[in-house]
Image (cartoon, rainbow, N blue to C red):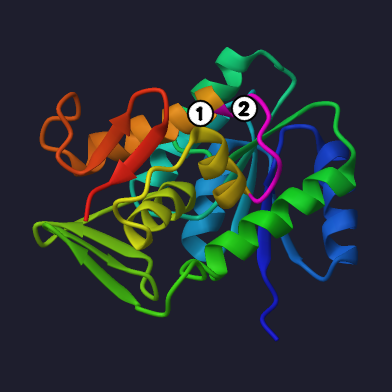
Amino acid sequence: MTQFTVLVTDDDKDIRDGIEIYLKNEGYHVLKAADGLEALQLIEENEVHVIVLDIMMPKMDGISATFKIREQKNIPIIMLSAKAEDSDKIHGLSVGADDYVTKPFHPMELVARVKSQLRRYTKLGNYQGQQQVIELDGLTLNKEAKDLSVEGESVKLTPIEFKITELLMVNAGRVFSINEIYERVWNEPAYNAENIVAVHIRKIREKIEADPKNPRYLKVVWGVGYKIDK
């Protein structure tokens, strides 16, 4: 059985050590970093499956570290922050994070989020149908390889972005409401989902559309939701 590795990055040693205890109790291998630079080095040297990343850190903060990670890797990132405002949450998600936990938090809540991200990261492609490669008008999605290409050019998507795209492509032509997308992709009841889903839709469009303001693929049905046409 694969032992998954979680990288915990926080400048507070007590928080790092506390999270480590709970994750190890669940059978995870844990790496720890005190800042973004140390985290980047550990990611280069080790196979990491989930990253827990504080925003406010010395040397390199979590936002800057996320930018660097997303240049090369699609590892799920869970951001930690003492800021609870929606604008901060949206900013974290917009730069490439997959989830966001506000301090203070119960360690078991974080463990549950880690498990959820691992399920999505390792089991992408479990929606309807067994077809592993889906082709739609220049879009090609390989569920097994977790790869999306546009007109033959590979596009780097985060795990959440891939999951949204997969949901819409597997069910091409069907319109999904914002709440449906959130519940199917995040696997939890939709709460304040509109901004969160909108951020990810915008990021996907920026990556797959030649003109994101006039999308060819990912279309909005006003008042209803989003779809990708057959």
Q: Is residue 220 left or right of residue 16?
A: left
Rendered-image quadrant of the N terminus:
bottom right
Where is residue 203? Give x, y as percent. Answer: 34, 34
Residue at 70% x, 45% y: name it. 188
In this view, 214 is above or below 167:
above
Where is residue 167? Give x, y as percent. Answer: 42, 55
Quarter of the image holding residue 104?
top right
Residue 223 in view (yes/no): yes
Where is residue 155? Give x, y as percent. Answer: 24, 53
Q: In this view, does 123 lie to the left or right of 161?
A: right
Q: In this view, does 7 lie to the left or right of 146?
A: right
The Cα–Cα distance between marks 2 and 1, rounded to whole angstroms, is 6 Å
Residue at 36% x, 73% y: name it. 145
Q: Residue 63 carries which label?
A: 1
Q: Give the range drawn in magenta.
A: 187-193
> Label 2, on which residue?
55
Q: In this view, does 123 lie to the left or right of 119?
A: left
Q: Nearer the viewer, residue 78 or 128?
A: 128
Q: Which of marks 2 and 1 is nearer the N terminus?
A: 2
Quarter of the image holding residue 29?
bottom right
Magenta span dominant secondary structure: loop
Amino acid at the residue labelled 1: Ile
Q: Which of 56 and 117 is in front in this view?
A: 117
Contact between marks 2 and 1 (CB within 8 A): the answer is: yes
Residue at 51% x, 52% y: name it. 41
In this view, 136 is above or below 33:
below
In this view, 101 is above or below 42:
above
Rendered-image quadrant of the C terminus:
bottom left
Q: What element carries label 2?
A: loop
| Residue ranking furthest to the bottom | 1
